[in-house]
Image (cartoon, rainbow, N blue to C red):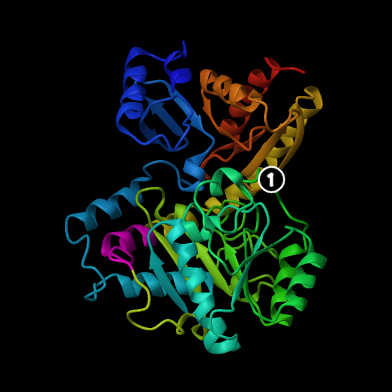
């Protein structure tokens, strides 16, 4: 991590803390060199007190803003009463939380877990059970179909579906029973589904975040739903990053309106059979995830076949209900829709003045700029360092794509202030 400790923008305190992580921690991340100690709303503060706009939102885990007082209160109130019982016993909040999530998102049942990757693993097991018990696929022959260039986590089974050599090299043998199909290609999907009766599910991100905020065609998700129904394949939507209002609707799979859940999701023509949530489900306070499905799918798993010590713990339940309520009551979904339109318009104006931006894309407040340079270039990283120096935090993905995703509480005035920072930084790197 020598490149961070020689950064002239860093204080001695920051350098010391970075070096301590390098000495005692695993080297499995490449963080932007800034050492944060406090967050409030749309802002983060480093150990020296400098303020930054947060335009990563912890990969969309902090949609409600940092340390939202209602979420923190729910957390601290519950933490003083009961935090964990394990699932060996009932607790007084799990049923209420399951009911709230089921009714909000329009499914019969909820299975609560912890991390996003753990929820994806849960969905993979669930759809295999359904494939054998309901669809009638011969035992051990079920195929899970994923979109190419996906990102669903870092576990062995999930990376088995990855195209990214950094995710897979040195971790084999990978898990069998996985196939991939081109993202946003309806014809390719139908060819796969029609040619193999052993496909149990198609697991897909409604918008591919880690790939660089790749937004599919308007009717892609509805076509996915129709094809999955036609070929008796489960449509599984990984909305860990795109859900919870991030894209200007409660779920990115809510393609027919800007919704508050429940009624819209039941009528939605692209409603998935299995929904995976995480990240902002807890407002960024603790790991909470959930898998939602109707009875035909969910009840295929019986006691002893899947679980988690911490999944559905009372602390997580209290935080989850507070986090979703805050999102809805404070109209953060609508704000994401409106501010996203203003933000993308501003980015496109910047692109018209500076050809360093090859493309602007996104939906709601999940956006990205693609820099006109090869993926192997370090220009995206340098631009993010300049963003940092000017008071805004973002991170490149795949080298030349910079994801820009502030908390959903951001105001129009703050959007314009952030756009000024972005343009000033990009002006230093005109091609």
- The answer to whether any part of residue 49 appears in the image is yes
Give the residue at mark 1. 362
Q: Quadrant of the C terminus?
A: top right
In the image, 217 versus 318, the foreground residue is 217
Q: Answer above or below: position of 234 versus 121.
A: below
Asked if residue 207 lies left or right of residue 314, the reply is right
Residue at the spot 40% in from the left edge and 75% down from the top edge: 99
- The answer to whether any part of residue 293 appears in the image is no
Residue 49 magenta-highlighted: no
Q: Position of residue 348 (x, y in %)?
A: 76, 33
Residue 314 magenta-highlighted: yes
Q: Secondary structure at mark 1?
A: strand
Q: Position of residue 326 (x, y in %)?
A: 43, 55
Q: Answer above or below: position of 146 versus 127.
A: above
Quadrant position of residue 201:
bottom right
Residue at the spot 48% in from the left edge and 18% down from the top edge: 3
Residue at the spot 62% in from the left edge and 54% down from the top edge: 150
Residue range of the region highlighted in magenta in the rendering:
308-321
In the image, 248 versus 148, the foreground residue is 148
In the image, 201 versus 142, the foreground residue is 142
Q: Position of residue 343 (x, y in %)?
A: 67, 37
Q: Residue furthest left?
A: 81
Q: Answer above or below: position of 13 versus 329.
A: above
Q: Position of residue 322 (x, y in %)?
A: 37, 58
Q: Residues within 10 Å of mark 1 (few under 14, many from 20)?
A: many
Q: Answer above or below: position of 393 versus 106.
A: above
Asked if residue 325 lies left or right of residue 357, the reply is left
């Amino acid at each position: 991590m020598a490149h961070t400790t020689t950064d002239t923008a860093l204080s001695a305190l920051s350098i010391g803390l970075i070096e301590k992580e390098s000495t005692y921690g695993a080297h499995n991340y490449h963080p932007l060199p800034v050492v944060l100690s406090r967050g409030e709303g749309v802002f983060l503060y480093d150990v020296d007190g400098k303020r930054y706009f947060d335009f990563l939102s912890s990969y969309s885990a902090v949609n409600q803003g940092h340390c939202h007082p209602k979420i923190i209160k729910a957390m601290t109130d519950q933490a003083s009463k009961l935090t964990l019982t394990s699932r060996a016993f009932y607790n007084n909040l799990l049923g209420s939380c399951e009911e709230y999530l089921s009714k909000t998102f329009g499914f019969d049942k909820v299975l609560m877990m912890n991390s996003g990757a753990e929820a994806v693993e849960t969905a993979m097991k669930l759809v295999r059970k359904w494939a054998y018990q309901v669809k009638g696929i011969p035992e051990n022959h079920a195929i899970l179909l994923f979109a190419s260039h996906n990102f669903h986590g870092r576990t062995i089974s999930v990376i088995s579906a990855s195209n990214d050599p950094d995710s897979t090299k040195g971790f084999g043998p990978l898990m069998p029973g996985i196939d991939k199909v081109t993202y946003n290609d309806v014809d390719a999907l139908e060819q796969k589904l029609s040619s193999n009766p052993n496909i149990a599910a198609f697991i897909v991100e409604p918008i591919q975040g880690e790939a660089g905020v790749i937004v599919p065609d308007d009717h892609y998700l509805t076509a996915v739903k129709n094809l999955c129904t036609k070929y008796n394949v489960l449509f599984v939507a990984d909305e860990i990053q795109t859900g919870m209002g991030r894209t200007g609707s409660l779920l990115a799979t809510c393609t027919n309106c800007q919704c508050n859940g429940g009624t819209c999701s039941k009528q939605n023509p692209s409603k998935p059979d299995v929904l995976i949530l995480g990240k902002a489900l807890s407002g960024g306070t603790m790991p909470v995830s959930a898998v939602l499905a109707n009875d035909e799918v969910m009840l295929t798993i019986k006691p002893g076949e899947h679980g988690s010590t911490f999944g559905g713990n009372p602390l997580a339940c209290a935080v989850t209900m507070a986090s979703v309520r805050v999102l809805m009551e404070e109209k953060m979904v609508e704000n994401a829709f409106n501010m996203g339109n203003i933000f993308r318009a501003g980015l496109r104006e910047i692109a018209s003045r500076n050809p360093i931006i090859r493309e602007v894309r996104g939906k709601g407040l999940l956006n990205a700029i693609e820099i006109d340079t090869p993926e192997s270039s370090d220009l995206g990283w340098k631009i993010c360092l300049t963003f940092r120096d000017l008071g805004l935090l973002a991170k490149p993905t795949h080298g030349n794509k910079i994801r820009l995703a502030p908390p959903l509480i951001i105001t129009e005035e703050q959007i314009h202030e952030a756009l000024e920072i972005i343009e000033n930084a990009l002006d230093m790197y005109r091609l």
